[in-house]
Image (cartoon, helix red, strand yellow):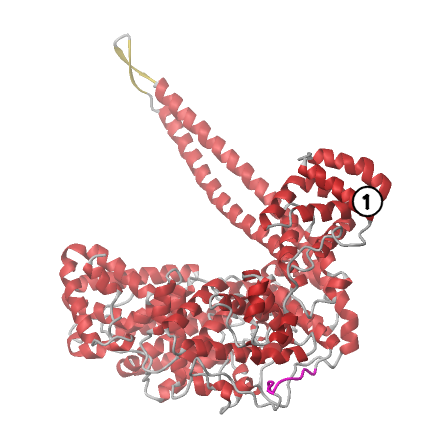
Amino acid sequence: MSSWRSLVLRIGENCTEYGGNTDYKDHLETCFGVVRRELLHSSDDILPFLLECAEQLPHKIPLYATLVGLLNLEDEDFVLNIVERIHANLQAALEVGNCNRIRVLMRFLTVLMCSKVLLPSSLIVLFETLLSSAATTVDDEKGNSSWQACADFYITCILSCLPWGGAELVEQVPEEIDRVLVGIQAYLSIRRHVSDTGCSAFEYNDERNQDDSQKDFLEDLWDRIQDLSAKGWKADSVPRPHLSFEPQLVSGKSHDFGPLNCPEQPNPPVEVTGITYGIQKHEAELKYPLRMRSLNIFPSSKTEQDLQPIDRFVVEEYLLDVLLFLNGCRKECASSMAGLPVSFRYEYLMCETIFSQILLLPQPPFKPIYYTLVIMDLCKALPGAFPSVVAGAVRALFDKIADLDMECRTRLILWFSHHLSNFQFIWPWEEWSYVLDLPKWAPQRVFVQEVLEREVRLSYWDKIKQSVESAPVLEELLPPKGTPNFRYSAEGADQTELSLSAELNGMVKDRLTSREIISWIESRVIPDHGPDIALRVVVQTLLNIGSKSFTHLITVLERYCQVIARICSDQDKQVLLLSEVSYFWRNNAQMTAIAIDRMMGYRLVSNLVIVRWVFLPQNVDQFHVSDRPWEVLRNAVNKTSNRITDLRKEISVLKKSVVSASEAASKAQSYLEDAKSKPTLTLVDGEPVLAENPVKMKRLQSNVDKTKESEVSLRESLEAKEALFARAVNEIEELLIFLYKNFKNILAEPLRDTEGNLHPSHEADEMAIDEENSPAAEVDSADERPQKSHPNGKSTRTGYNVGEKEQWCLSTLGYVKALTRQYSSEIWPHIEKLDAEVLTQDVHPLVRKAIYSGLRRPADGF
């Protein structure tokens, strides 16, 4: 990398504001001097690289803006090109709805204004353009209020710029910025308050969170900006390097920023109903998702002590930007997160921010593994501070696990087990040994049980048993050793079936074909013993042969899937097949899920059959104490949903290819016709004669034939994919209706029996983490452990006052909401049928509430 590139990329990293020990003024001057010299012959390379750095390292934007301001003193045309390029990029981002680019470019423009590169009036015009679009969108007469998510995003972008440039705007254009703020206040008065009940990590807010829950994200940000304004627009978390160069920068030319156009939102439906409004609202929220939902894990004394309210927002912005733009460089990501340009400690806030992303609903921006790696790297980069903070967060979330959304519980289990696997599975399990005294359905006990089960998957049983030696009582919660449960290996097995199994085993060893085995089954086994015994013998034997490893299982299923398909020709037999799989792998939940998933992939069982099996009484009874049936159900719905997603992408690509092929065919045809209409001079018997060139005409005709053939082939492929897509849409509609009918039916009676008793578990003693002087809140040292105040050494929260039936209802309703939220994009197109066949008058209100919350659909439809 050339020296100027390295200087621009690493700008400020050795400065005190970014954790270094040098003065940023000297660093900026050095960088400016090198870049200025390179402008003469590398300006075409410097401009895009500088913009790329500003966009993808936005926590350094004040430094990049100051550098541009200094360059403006030397080469106004170069900086004008930068401003014009930003204008083009911002306009393009607005048109496609690229939220991150819009937000970062607006911040860059704001700091460029502080560095005298941009006219303050131009920035005000930009703010007013977005404000006007937002106000029009939420206007019931002129706009389409279902797209409020877009309008809220525009206002958020304006407000989020003010910590970086509010002071300069108030100083230079006070009346104009006041007009913008008054307009934002007017907007807030006409917009709808956004209820976050469907996407809140906690089902029930505790008293500390109740005030916050009354404000949505935009209202909270507005309050923080109001506080910043009252304090003179001074934010400790925002570096202002341009102030050191202000005497020079004021002599530069401030450039104008041309007008921008916000895209028009879709027209409201002709007939506005709860369904049409909800569908468009869902589309808007998908395109303009909320970037973050604050997750209050620690007391405010830990996260915001001695901080202005705006500082929390700014630090969260820094952290989210680093997570977003450095997602491919985990070491750089951890290093940048640990060295933000702030003068206060923020380990607790950083931990809360990362966990808010892990638990972000409806889904986080990245796969959970990414956050696992970031936390692991931060623990290594900050060994004296961050591990204890993470441990404190785990304890706090564990104390409130009963109130955590079911999907968030699953994510927390997966993250925690994976995190421990990177640190030799070390954890003070003795702190949680009291869960063994809780009922088997208590969420804390289930959490520990599921974490241990996931750890076994990531390691092996004896290793995990060794890891809980400090709390040997917890060995009872370890899953069984994952050995197969072969029906014909135990004493007392039916001798007839045993001999049949041995005979089939010999056939497989002798590599008999599927046809030969099917012939044996149909001629000897079924006539003499019946189809059920034939199924049991075949499935048990084949699973036993494939039990050595996942590869063995796949090989057996691939080789003998025709045999299984022949004896499982209807849904009842397929349900029996799944029951046999579950019986065989009852000691290994992972292999159960893998085997069923593979069988669905080979079309040995359908998704409807899997749903039928999940709702068998023996599985329904496990809904509140095990993730086993839910994992199988999620896999089935995922596979069906992913098929639609894949087909939709393939169809989109094919449509573009068809358009390109059609244009190529038209162009080839026009070349041919043009050649025919314009004959060329050809020598005939030595005399020039006007005639067609046969070689050229043959080549052009061949090109026409090829392009038309390619177009026809692509159109046929498109038609085939569209037919598959239509079939897949019908399939998922049938699956969803069948799934929700089952939920409705199994919940009806238990909800009638427990009506009025469904409430969260709130003991008289609040969780320790919320108490100001609690030892659990003091986790500044990696060696500290929360001290137990209970006389018998257990946690102050040792009881669980929810009965088994109530907990079953709470867990099942939680999963209904989680599944609805996860597959809301597939549910909304079929909402009318769901309303007609499931959400009828006889459905229990709590079932309706769970589904509506998952869809983020208001109970009144608007």
**Nearer to the camera, 116 or 816:** 816
Counting every numbered tag in the picture gives 1
Residue reaching furthest to the front:
491
Q: Is residue 801 visible?
A: yes
In the displayed structure, 664 sits above or below 751; it is: above
Residue 7 covered by magenta stretch = no
User: Residue 4 is drawn in which quadrant?
Assistant: bottom left
Instruction: Please give the range of residues in magenta.
Output: 793-801
Residue 196 in picture, x, y percent from top left: 56, 75
- Classify mark 1: helix, strand or loop: helix
Judge the density around disc 1: few (<14), some (14-19), many (≥20) Cα neighbours within 10 Å.
some
664 over 813 or under it: above or below: above
Counting from the top left corner in percent of width and height, residue 534 is at 79, 44
Location of residue 404 in the rendering, given as x and y in whole percent from the top left corner: 59, 75
- Which residue is pictured at 66% across the width and 77% down the height? 436
Which residue is at a point 71% across and 34% down the rendered structure image?
Answer: 515
Q: Quadrant of residue 167?
A: bottom left
Q: Is residue 384 left or right of residue 396?
A: left
The foreground one among 848 and 493 is 493
> Mainly helix, strand or loop, the magenta region?
loop
In the picture as drawn, the residue positioned furthest to the top comes out as 685
Quick one: quadrant of the N terminus? bottom left
Type of the residue with mark 1: Pro
Is residue 299 shown left or right of residue 477? left
Q: Is residue 95 left or right of residue 540?
A: left
Residue lying at 66% horizontally and 61% vertically, measured from the top left: 831
Image position, residue 565 (x, y; %) = 72, 42
Which residue is found at the position 18% from the left and 70% from the top?
Answer: 70
Give the residue at mark 1.
531
In which quadrant will I find the C terminus? bottom right
